[in-house]
Amino acid sequence: MTDLLGVDAPIVLGPFGGLSSVALTAAVSDGGGLGSFGLYGYAPPRIHDTIAALRAATDRPIAVNLWMPRGDEVTPDTVDATAALDAAEPLFRRAGIARPALPAAFLPAVDEQLDAVLAARPDVLSVVFGVPDAETLARARQHGIRVIGTATSVAEAVALDAAGVDAIVATGMEAGGHRVSFLRDAAASLVGTFALVPQVVDAVGVPVIAAGGIADRRGVAAAFALGAAGVQVGTAFLRTRQSAATAAHRAAIASAADTDTVLTRAMSGRLARGIPNMAVHELEAAGEIAPFPAQNWLTGVFRQAAAASGDRELLSLWAGQAAGLTRFDDAADVLAELRAGVPA
């Protein structure tokens, strides 16, 4: 993994869609790992500027992450979000904002995002929710960009390996944030890290990066014992002051116990793991959740206001089941702890 990615330690920062920061990405890369930045929802000009900022912040390898289209995404002209907006009305009022009108588009086109990423030439492109096509992989190789896929099952890992990715993240159900399944529904793909990683290692020919439930040196050592060539860590880094998580979000992670996270579709329309709050409870009780990405846009309206005001009850408090193992508020300390678990 170190040779493949040009890093000193086989430790990858989890890419946070909406919560990534240049400071955290650069800190992990400067510390010898692979810093990652999630580009979910970024239009091409913002992608260009973000990668330029990352290049200015560190001269070490960096990764950026994109969401592949799964085929079930809705658009403003194909979805009726009235019921979901009605259900969220109390949350808009709490945030002190008006009920929003549907935008012209929920997300930028993925092919335009890919063009922008490839033009900016990061060292690594990681993808979730699908398999990059042959043209994308060929173009990435022409630019010297490594491509990492993400799997929640053995079948997904085999599909990524057959396509020709350079490495695969095997992410167990313990991981925080979205369950990035693409061959079956996420609820039918809830395999734990301890079971998933060795089966993926046995099934593919490329290096496997373990993710989910890893927050300290013990988790790293366990991942290598299972056959992984590296680890990807999210929640422990999300707690640090370098992340873009709000103070309220970081405090929620710091105080979370092993049973304090849930899987919910309430905040985005897709299954994701986080710490439940008023927004999750209200939306689940109402039972009116729009499909992705309409629901993610809808909650994003009050989440943005909540981030500014510090209201944790309206945020997406993404966190994994290992939140209770997190200890540090500085990325350098997290990285040092993780590196201590890498076999000599």
Image (cartoon, rainbow, N blue to C red):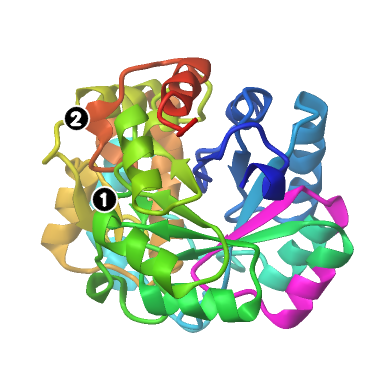
Q: Position of residue 128 (x, y in %)?
A: 52, 63
Residue found at x 40% / y 42%: 303
Q: Is residue 131 magenta?
A: yes
- Asked if 307 appears above or below 202 in the picture, the reply is above
Q: Nearer the viewer, mark 2 or mark 1?
A: 1
- Asked if 51 appears above or below 269 in the picture, the reply is above
Q: Nearer the viewer, residue 36 or 312?
A: 36
Specify start and end residues of the magenta stretch as a single range: 119-139
Q: Which mark is residue 174?
A: 1
Q: Residues within 10 Å of mark 1 (few under 14, many from 20)?
A: many
Q: Amino acid at mark 1?
A: Glu
Q: Which mark is residue 256?
A: 2
Q: Position of residue 135 (x, y in %)?
A: 78, 79
- Asked if 294 appears above or below 248 in the picture, the reply is below
- Which of the 4 quarters of the picture holds residue 269? bottom left
Label 1 sits on a secondary structure element that is loop
Q: Amino acid at mark 2?
A: Ala
Residue found at x 62% / y 23%: 31
Tell which circle, 2 or 1, labels the residue nearer the N-terminal end: 1
Q: Is residue 74 visible?
A: no
Label 2 sits on a secondary structure element that is loop
Evaluate if marks 2 and 1 touch, with contact meaning CB atoms under 8 Å apart.
no
